[in-house]
Amino acid sequence: MNYRDFKGTAIAEVGLGTWQLGSADWGNINEDDAINILKTYTDAGGNFLDTADVYGMGVSETVIGKFLKAVNHPVYVATKLGRRGDAPNGWPQNFTYDAMKRQTEDSLRHLDIPRLFLEQLHCIPTTELQSGKVFDHLRSLQQQGLITHFGASVETSEEALICLEQEGLASLQIIFNLFRQHVADEVFARAAKKGVAIIVRVPLASGLLSGRFDAQTQFAANDHRNYNANGDAFNAGETFSGIEFKEGITLADKIKNLLPDNRMPQWAIRWILDHPEVTTVIPGASKMAQVNSNVEASFLPHLPEAIHKDLRELYNAEIYDKIRGHF
Ligand SMILES: NC(=O)c1ccc[n+]([C@@H]2O[C@H](COP(=O)([O-])OP(=O)(O)OC[C@H]3O[C@@H](n4cnc5c(N)ncnc54)[C@H](OP(=O)(O)O)[C@@H]3O)[C@@H](O)[C@H]2O)c1
C-alpha cells in the first residue's frame, strides 16, 4: 500500500468506505462479516476508514469501534455529522453548536475513542455552508480537543469552492470517478493550493464501474441501488454516480474496452489515483475479496497518457450530459 500526506499524517491512498457495514442500504452485512472486511483492509496495509453517524444509525461506527480494540497500529477514522433526523436532531436543528457537539460526542461514544481524527459535514444544505457558522462550530470542537481535523463532504463543485474559503478546512470529500471527471478541472487545483486533502467517494459508481453488472442485475428493495436508482430518496448522484442504470452498463462496457486488461475495478481506482491532488479514495466493499482487489490499485502502474486522453474524450462526448442529480 502506498500512503499520501493528510495534514502531516501518512494515510493509505486506498481507504475503505464503510456505508456498507451496518446499514441495510447495500443488503445486510452481519457484524462478523463487517469485522472480517475491516481486518482484510488493515491486513493489506490500510489505515483510513470513512464512516458516518447515520450508517446504520451508529452501527457502522460501533463495529469500527470494536474492531479498533483488536488492532495494534494506528487506524485513522473519518466520520460525518449533519444528516440525523432523530429528535431533537433534524434539519435545520442539526447545525447549531449544541447539536453538532452532541452528534460528535455520540460518534466518539460509538467508536469508543477520545478524539476523532476527522469530522466531516455530511452533504448539508448549501445555505449552511454559505453562512459559515457550521465551520465556527467545528473550529470550537477542534479547540476543545474533540476532533483533530474537520472537513466537508459535498455534492457539487460549487459547494467545494465555498468550503475551500474556510480557515482550517483539512479535507473535501467529493464524488470523482470515470463517470464524474470534470470535478478535477473545477476543484482540484484550488484544493491543492490551499493544502486541502481530497477524499474521493463513490469511486466505482456504486459498483457499475466494476463492470460486473448487466441488464439482468437486480437489487433488493432496501438496497439504495433499487429505491434510489432515480434519486427518489436522496441525491441521484450518490447512486450509480447519477447515471441511469442501463445506460451505465453500456457506458461501463465502453470504458472497459479502453482499459489495459479486464481488471476493471482496479483500473477505475488507478485512474483516480493517477490524479496527484487526490489524497485517498474510499471504495466501499461488501466482501473481503473486493477489499483486496481495490487495494491492488495502489500497486498498479499509472495508466498511459493516451488512455487518460481516450477516457476523457469518451466522458466529454457520451457521459457528462447523462449525469443526473445535484452535481
Ligand atoms: N454523502 C457522502 O458523504 C457519501 C455518500 C456515498 C458514499 N460515501 C462514502 O464513500 C464510500 C464509497 O462509496 P460507495 O460505497 O457509495 O460506492 P462505491 O465505492 O463506488 O461502490 C461500492 C460497491 O461497489 C461494489 N464493489 C466494490 N469493490 C468491488 C470490486 N473490487 N469488484 C466488484 N465490485 C466491487 C460493491 O457492490 P456490492 O455490495 O453489490 O458487491 C460495493 O458495495 C461509502 O462506503 C461511504 O463511506 C459518502
Image (cartoon, rainbow, N blue to C red):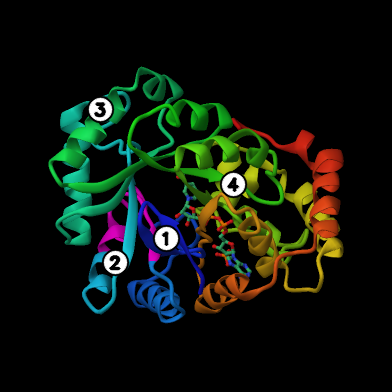
Q: Residue at x 43, y 77 (%)?
A: 45
Residue 56 among those drawn in magenta: yes
Q: Residue at x 59, y 46 (%)?
A: 239
Q: Is residue 132 above or below residue 310?
A: above
Q: Residues within 10 Å of mark 3 (few under 14, many from 20)?
A: few
Q: Distance from label 1 to label 4 (Cα)?
A: 15 Å
Instruction: Give amino acid for label 1.
Output: Thr
Return the residue at label 3: 136
Q: Which residues are magenta?
A: 48-63
Asked whether the residues under the numbered discs 1 and 4 touch, taking CB atoms below 8 Å apart as contact, a structural biologist would say: no
Count of numbered marks: 4
Q: Distance from label 1 to label 2 (Cα)?
A: 10 Å
Sequence-first disc among 3 and 4? 3
Which disc number belongs to residue 63?
2
Question: Residue 204, image x and y in percent?
Answer: 63, 57
Question: Residue 216, image x and y in percent?
Answer: 75, 62
Sequence-first disc among 2 and 4? 2
Return the residue at label 4: 239
Residue 57 among those drawn in magenta: yes
Sequence-first disc among 3 and 2? 2
Asked whether the residues under the numbered discs 2 and 4 touch, taking CB atoms below 8 Å apart as contact, a structural biologist would say: no
Q: Residue at x 37, y 51 (%)?
A: 7
Along the viewing direction, whichever of 21 and 67 lies nearer the viewer: 67
Sequence-first disc among 3 and 1? 1
Q: From where the camera sits, is residue 310 visible?
A: yes
